[in-house]
Every structure is written in structure tokens, then in C-alpha cells.
Amino acid sequence: MTEFSPRYLKDYQVPDYKITTVNLTIELDDTKTVVTNVMEVSKVGVHQRALTLDGEHMQLMSVMVNKDKLTASQYQLNESTLTIADLPEQFTLTITTQINPVANTALEGLYKSADVYCTQCEAEGFRRITYFLDRPDVMAVYTTKIIADKTSFPFLLANGNKVEQGDLSNNMHFVTWHDPFPKPCYLFALVAGDFDLLEDSFTTKSGRVVKLELFVDKGNLSRSEHAMVSLKKSMLWDEQQFNLEYDLDIYMIVAVDFFNMGAMENKGLNVFNSKFVLADDLSATDDDFFNVEAVIAHEYFHNWTGNRVTCRDWFQLSLKEGLTVFRDQQFSADMHSSTVTRIKNVKIVRAQQFAEDAGPMAHPIRPEKVMEMNNFYTLTVYEKGSEVIRMMHTILGDDAFKAGIKLYFERHDGQAVTCDDFVAAMSDASNTDLSQFKYWYSQSGTPELSVSDEYDAKSNTYQLTIEQNHPETHDKQEKHNLHIPINVELITSDNNLNQGGLLHSKQKTQTWTFENVFTKPVPALLGNFSAPVKLNYQYNDQDLNVLMVNASDEFNRWDAGQKLFAGYIKQLVNNAELELPMQIAEALAQVLNSDADNAFKAEQLVLPSFDEMAAAIDEVNPGALVRAISILKRFIAEQLQSKFIATYQSLCTNEFAKDGAAIGNRALKNVCLDYLALLDGANELVLNQFNQANNMTDQLAAIKTAALNDLICFEDVMVEFARQWQGNTLVMDKWFSINAMHNNENVVQRITGLLTHPEFSIDNPNRARALIGAFAFYNSHYFHNKDASGYKFLFEQLTKLNAINPQVASRLITPLIQFKSFDNNHQQLMKVELEKLSQLDNLSRDLLEKLTAALQ
Ligand code: TRP
Ligand code: ZN
């Protein structure tokens, strides 16, 4: 068995060798693909150290140094490395390997997705294609020649520009690609298959014409338009906002059905999970359209933040991911409602990232210790990473931030750099000391702010005192006080105060004094979620009401409502009999009556999720939390029934549109439906919406409402939905998920049965996530059932996935390893399953790392 040992950031060393050019010839074959890799290699500095290349899951066919073929005694080969000693200063190294793409169910390296050959090299997949220095600070110029059957694989794609193509004997053909930009091997890509092709072009601001090509499975052309439009919007936005222009003559995107993540930014040749490309009015929801645009933008933005300037080592992953998520969030905010976009980001941080930071895999956005790199593509690196960039944007302001980005590219274009280099550019360009701020990169855990205040009516002064607390995290890291930007707005009920601003909390405890405050204000704290922290301040209901109505910032109004709900949910967890005050309903009636846009109203009406509440409560009893949320929801539904009905009816329309207003209308309508589903007449209402729906948003909302409320029509609408959409894998994924979310005690039986459904296949990550993931992540009620049947179901599936696809298994284990959030009973039951998993033979490195952390 392979030894799995962790790697540490502190052990980083520059490579002993550099590889400056790579010439690949790849002869594609289902089980015997031959890869010939001709590299120009040279020593870095003067030394006699051997060259150790990474490589796994391959057959080594031959090794040649310059013209000499090495014998087996001239190199050392083991499961994961190839070592060659006594090398000259500079030489040509030719390595031939044979690989088996069809057997590759892990979907790393070269694999076959349906009838398409494709690659996924990030983070360390290139070492499954050829022996190489598989680390991002080794950058080379690649030329790639692909050879395959002409009938089955008319399109042969790789990074860069096409330089040659031609026919060979036996119906074979070849295409050669050259990418002039030196890049790390994780950005290498190859695709071969037959596709429908959507072509377009974009003229950059300096007047260069870039060919845009989008490859989708045959028959899907009509579903690829939105992705192409999104790409062009992204290209324009990056020019306008950051002065960043695309650099090659062609930009290709390929959609594949088997993919471990969302998408991959390979230079000039993005490979996408088809879920984030294909969308049309009938089969995609408004959220799907939003997400396609966001992921297209994310991968496009990587061309500068990731590709032109890349990471020195994988500990620096947030250098590219945090920054690129920030950029895609800003893009989405510009394309849509900025408040609603921000609310969506914040919910993910509060519900999921906070949970990760409180669990056994807590790590800083720049981790210090990694066993399996794939385990660190996390909410912390991505989402908290983006929040850290956003805080710099808040502290420096837009102009200085952009000057920092400009300096970063001036200094580092073409280099592999660190998070420190990024912060240095920000600091230098703005003349701002960010030394304390940098602890955000090295410190895990969610900081907690305790805020108290004092109003003095005599002197008309108001004092705010803010204390930082840094709870211990699983990694036992030493904690420092952080530089935390805190947006404050002082609100009065007569709404005549215009004070506040950005406070910089830097010490354990700090006090700020505001003068000329003539009535006692309510502080709106952490406006726009100015820092990824938890906040404690004793608001009473009246304070929150004032904020909900008078805060000048929409985000603060929303947040006040969330605090009001969260307060009652917490009380209801301990006392289900609690009498709820009418003010809650009155506040929401005001929301419904306000003239805000409907997308925002919809957000204001949605209660905090189970996950968000779980992250905010200690030792959660999941059943009690589910019940508490539903009591509050029913109370609101009952009190506002007539308003919900009126609003619902006013928003029903036969016309389908996709503009912001229409999307907002659907969002609000479906929130009303969600409340009305708890009252008499729900079944008819849902059935009616299902039958009338002329778009996926409404249709899906209907079946989801039927599932979450276990309505009588549930079975019927599910059968009808499946009949209508069979064969459409992306829509059937939604159907599998809704099955898994069924709020009924037989749900485990139901999903166990679906494992053998003809359209289900555990080998496909989207299917596995749709059924198994949706159950474990979203059916909080029955996943946490006291009889442990939910935990056992997940255990069974993880044992299979561990062998098939460790990356997918490792993501799906998340709800089990976060047992610390729950009460002791549930903790014990969850740990039993984790113990059982840890006993598996052939436990993947991915699961082993998480299990070790969880059971320690
Ligand atoms: N760099 C990709 C992104 O953020 C992430 C990614 C895609 C990835 N596929 C992967 C990470 C496979 C690890 C493994 O857009
Ligand atoms: Zn990314």
C-alpha cells in the first residue's frame, strides 16, 4: 500500500530542474493510448541531484535522454515517481507511456466521458498522462499532436492555436496544436470527439478578432446559446472593469457529461460540466441560467487570474480561486440585482463555509498542510477566499484596488507566485499597511464579534465597543487579532441620522464614539457583510423592525429580517410552544407591501436555512431545528395567508419572459407557494402550478413543494415529470434530487430503489450528487433520522464511491464529518459510520485525510 504523507507549505523549495518545452504526441485508444512526451529539460543552478518525476496509474514504455534509450537499471521506478540520476546540464528527455482512458473512473488525467476523450489535470492529474514535474511552478510551452479515428473523433482539440492537420492511413487523422504561453501542466487539456459546434467571435478593444467555439453533444446546439452570450459578456466586462483583454486567437469551450467539478480553465480550451453550459427556457431554471453565466465568467476570468499569473504551489490556490470568485461575483452583481447577488453569496458563506471552519477540516484560505490536494478545493479557499479579496476592496476602495490589480500584473505576468505577492502589490499600489490584514490568509476559523453600545442623551454621544474573539479550531492554530473592516450605519426610527462608515477593528477591544447623535440609534452592523465573521449584538425585535424598514442599505434591511427570524427559530428549538408575536407577520406584511423589486422581496421572505441555523447553534438536535423552522413558517403562512394568495395570483402569468423583472416575479411567486403549501388547498395549488407551468422554474418549484410538504399529488407529479423529461439527463438530475428531498419517512427506501433506476449511474458524478448528495445535504430531516438509516445509506454509497471516484466520495462525506455541530446522540451515530468507513480496504487518500481529521 502506498504511504500517504502530508506535505507542508513551509517545506516549499524551488525545483531542481526546469522543463521549458513539451512536445506531446497522443495516439488515442480506449484501453491503450500511447503518449510520447519530448521535453527540453535543464538544471536550475549547479548541482548533481537526480531528477524525480511524478507519474501514476500508467505503464512506462521507454525513457530516452537525448539519443540514448535508458535501460531499467538507469532509472528508478515506483508507484508514484520515476527518478533519473547523472544527468547533464541540459538535455532532451523523451518518455513514452501507455494509459487506459476507459478504466479511468476517477476522471483525473485522460478519461472517456460517454464517447468523448477528455482530460482533467488540475490539481495533479497530468501525472496520469505522462511522467512530469507536476507542480504549478514548472512552466513550459506545449505542442500537442493528437491522433485518432476520423469518423468517431472528427474534432481533435488541445490548448492554443491549431498549427497542422492531416489524414493518416486506416481512417486515422491528426491535428497539432501549439500554445505560445508557458503554462503549468495543470492547464494542459485535450479533447477528442464528435460535436455540434456553435461559432461566434469577439473583437477585443484593441481590435483583435477572437474566434469563439462552443462544442456540445450532437443535438444540443439550441441549448448552447446562453453560454455563448455569457462568454461575450464576460470578455467585455473584464476589458471594461480591469482592462484585461483575451490573448489567444481562439477560445474553445467543450461541454462533457462526466465531470468532477463545475468547469476547468485550461488555457484556450475550457472543459465544462454540461450542467454549466446547456440551458434553454423549457428545461433550465432561472438559477440554472444564472449559474451558467457565472461559471462561464469564472473560467474566462481565470485566463488572467490563474493562467497568465499562476500559483507557485498548491497551498496558494486561493491566489487564483478567491480572486476569481470575487471577480465572478462582481460580474454577476453587475449583470443582475447587486443586492440579491450579494445575498446569495453571503448565504453560502454563513451556511456552508462557517460549518467547514467549525469542522474537522478547518483550514486557512492558504492551507499549511495538505495530504490530498483535491480536498482543498473548498468553500474556505473559494468563498472565504473571495471574502478576503472583497475586504481588501472595501478597505482600499475601488480605484486603489484596481491600481493594485494593475501592479500585480505588471510585476508578475508570466510568473507563478504567492498570496504574499498579491497582497504586496495591493499594499504597494495603495500605500496601505496590510501586514495585520495578512493573518486572514494564515488563520482558520470564523471570528466572532461581540458588540455593545451606550448612548448618552446629555452629551449626544453614542459609543460602540467591538470585541474580537477567535474560537479554537480543529487545527489548533494560534490565533491573532485580525484587521476586520466593519461597515456601520446608525439608524433612528425617525430616520434622520446619516452617520456611520467603515470601522477598522484591529485590537481585541476597541471603542468608537459618534458625536451629535440626538436620538438613540440602532446600529446596522457589518453592512453588505463587510467581513466573514459572526456577530453578537443584543437587538430587540423593535430594533430589528427599525432596521428592516429604515436601513438605507437593502442588504442591511434583509439581514435585519434574517436576524429576527433566527432569534425566534433559536427560541423555538428549545420551546416549541413559544407564542410568536404578531410583529413578525406585520414586518413581513410591510415587506410585501413595499415597492422594492420582487426578487429582493422574495429574499426577505425566505427564512434562514437549516444549515445556516445549524452553523449558528451549538449541539443542534436536527429534528428540533427542522420543527422550529416549520413552526415559524406555518405561523407566517397562517397570518399572511390572504396576502400570499393575492400576491401569488397577481404574479401568475401565461407569458414567459427572462428579464430581471420576470425572474423576480417567479421568485416571489414561488416563495408565496412555499408558504401556502402549509395551508388548506395546498395540493390543488401545487398541482395546478405543475400543470400550467411553461418553464422549468415553475415546474420544479411545484414538484419541490410537493416533496418538501409530502403533498398527496407528490407521486403523480413525479411520475408525470419523469415521463416528460426522460432522456434529458440534466433535468432528470433535478428529478433525482427532488426524490431525495422527499419529506417522508420512506425516503431512504425510495432512494435505495432509485439506485437501480435505468437513468441512474453512480459512475456519473452529476447523478451521484443529484441523488446521494441531495439526500445528505438537503434532506436534513431524514438524513439525521434517529434510526441512523440516513447515515447508513450514505456509508453504503461512500464505500462504492471510494473505489470508483474518490473525489466525488470525498465531497459527499461532508455532512457526516461535520458531526460536531449536532447533539451527542447524533454525533455518536455519525461516528459509527465514519469508523466503519475508516476500516475499508483501499481507502482512498481523499477519504483517509478527512476520516483521520474527523476521528482524531
Ligand atoms: N480550477 C477549477 C475552477 O475553479 C476547479 C476544478 C475543476 C477542479 N476541475 C477540477 C479542481 C478537478 C480539482 C479537481 O474553475
Ligand atoms: Zn476557479
Image: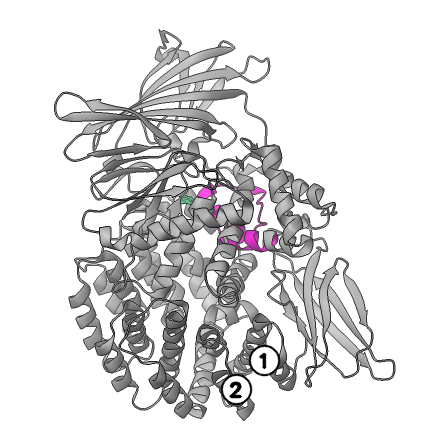
Q: Secondary structure at mark 1?
A: helix
**Residue 440 in the figure: left or right of residue 58:** right
Decide: is 838 above or below 499. above
Label at residue 590? 2
| Residue 719 in sight | yes
Q: Residues within 10 Å of mark 2 (few under 14, many from 20)?
A: few
Q: Nearer the viewer, residue 585 or 57?
A: 585
Which quadrant does the N terminus fall into? top left
Specify the quadrant of the image occupied by residue 622. Answer: bottom left
Dot 1 or dot 2, earlier in sequence: 1
Asked if residue 167 lies in the magenta stretch, the reply is no
Q: Nearer the viewer, residue 486 or 816?
A: 486
Instruction: Please state the horizontal and vertical placement of residue 545, each as a whole percent of the image.
Output: 60, 84
Q: Which residue bears the numbered disc 1? A: 548
Magenta stretch contains residue 365? yes
Look at the numbered discs 1 and 2 and tell me whether their residues touch, using CB distance below 8 Å: yes
Q: Residues within 10 Å of mark 1 (few under 14, many from 20)?
A: many
Region of the chain picked out in magenta, as a range: 363-388
Dot 2: element: helix
Residue 520 position in % (x across, y down): 75, 82
